Image (cartoon, rainbow, N blue to C red):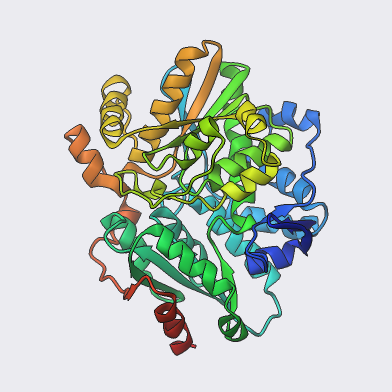
Amino acid sequence: MLLYSTNNSALKADLKEAVLKSLAPDKGLYMPEFIPTLPADFIQALPTLSFQEIAFEVAKTLFQGFIPEADLKTIIERSITFAAPVHMLDDRAGSLELWHGPSLAFKDFGARFMAALMSYFNQGNDKKLSILVATSGDTGGAVAFGFLDVPGIEVTILYPKGKVSLLQEKQLTTLGSNIKAIEIDGTFDDCQALVKEAFLDKELNAVYQLSSANSINIARLIPQSFYYFEAFKQLKSFGDEIVFAVPSGNFGNLTAGLIAKRMGLPVSKFIAATNINKIVPDYLVSGLYEPRISISTISNAMDVGNPSNFARMFDLYNGDVEAMKQDMIGYFVTDEETKTMLRDIYDKYQYVADPHGAVAYKALAFYLEGHPEAVGAFFETAHPSKFEDVVNDALGIAVEIPERLAILASREKQATPMRADFADFKKHLLSIV
């Protein structure tokens, strides 16, 4: 399997190099040189297949023999160990619950698969693999749990001070072992910029074998495509025109869906649901991509002003916004609308959503109103207890906190405070070699 840089299609790497290095030397993101199509009989057979069987077939087709089948099966069996159920609210709309993993967030799928894949590729290497990851909330927790105690791998998580929930922060900062946290006085975009600059710094790369667990790494996107097939399987009995509303920040989750569609999954439409950081919805209207400084909201994991994966989306459609609009529409939701949706979902269905799911629900409801034959799922990307302050305030109830999250509340935070300055970040990394 060969991949190329989104900045230069002539710059190529195999799967191992792309996964372990994350970012191309020219700062581009890696994309598969060829996205193969799954056979039609596989799509027809989805209702008869387990989630692990679906994941294996999708990965095997995409990897094109790069990893022996027996090894790939082991990677799948170790990483895809929890369900992705669609909880139907009525006969047209369902919640795709992606929070049944260890950190209670959708990013568990990508983090666990990536950890297993990186561990496989790093076998026999005497030099430790150092993972740098920026998080606006759930990525850090998923990566922390996914890579905890994985031999030969160390993880450093950067997160914006005061811009993640308390329980999210506990997931990043209390596990210890090979997981370290840095609290950046800035935004998620600042954290992401520090990570990207580190990958391109010659001095750091001479000392460290650096990689990323953010969605800039193609290994994060691949397993996220698996649950689109799994969700489609569950929705098929409700209708033929199937749509997905995806709460979006860095746009890795939605890009994974677009790759699934290229592989043959007949999704009718993707709805890019954002908060007021609506860079991509605006692009789909104007055709102009205009990054901005991110704005803080109650759906904080989507507070991204310059989505990294837009480069992949742009590449998939060769920069043709009209072609992109055939597969996708954009929709943005304010904080007040998000709170209203949290209440509406609870009052109407006795279902507790998280703020990101509420954004996606609003977008899905709007779409279904104008498309009476469509059925769809909105993505519940995190357990609502991870945003208990927002949810409790909106609903007037105390959301139940799962035990595996509750036990972290009393643990002491361990994080290094730092300015959003690359010189400081580099100095810190060099001091702990």
Relative side of 382 to 395, left or right: right
Count of numbered badges drawn on the protein: 0
Give the image location of residue 244, x and y in percent: 53, 30
Residue depicted at 59% across the width and 70% down the height: 211
Which residue appears at 70% of the width and 69% of the height?
121
Classify the position of the N terminus by image quarter.
Answer: bottom right
Is residue 396 depicted above or below 160 in this figure?
above
Percent position of residue 50, x then y: 64, 38
Q: Quadrant of residue 400?
A: top left
**Residue 96 placed where, x, y %?**
48, 34
Residue at 45%, 34% (x, y): give it: 273
The residue nearer to you, when weighing 296 against 22, is 296
In the image, 299 versus 188, the foreground residue is 188
On screen, residue 90 versus residue 223, left or right, reads: left
User: Could you tell me which residue is drawn at 69 percent across and 42 percent down?
Assistant: 316
- Say above or below: 130 vs 243: below
Q: Quadrant of residue 206?
A: bottom right
Please say whether residue 246 is visible from this viewpoint.
Answer: no
Of residue 404 and residue 266, the one placed in the foreground of this image is: 266
Residue 201's place in the image compared with 102, above or below, is below
> Is residue 154 visible in this depiction of the protein?
yes
Residue that lies at the very extreme toward the top in this rendered image = 372
- Where in the figure is residue 153, as x and y percent of width and height? 56, 75
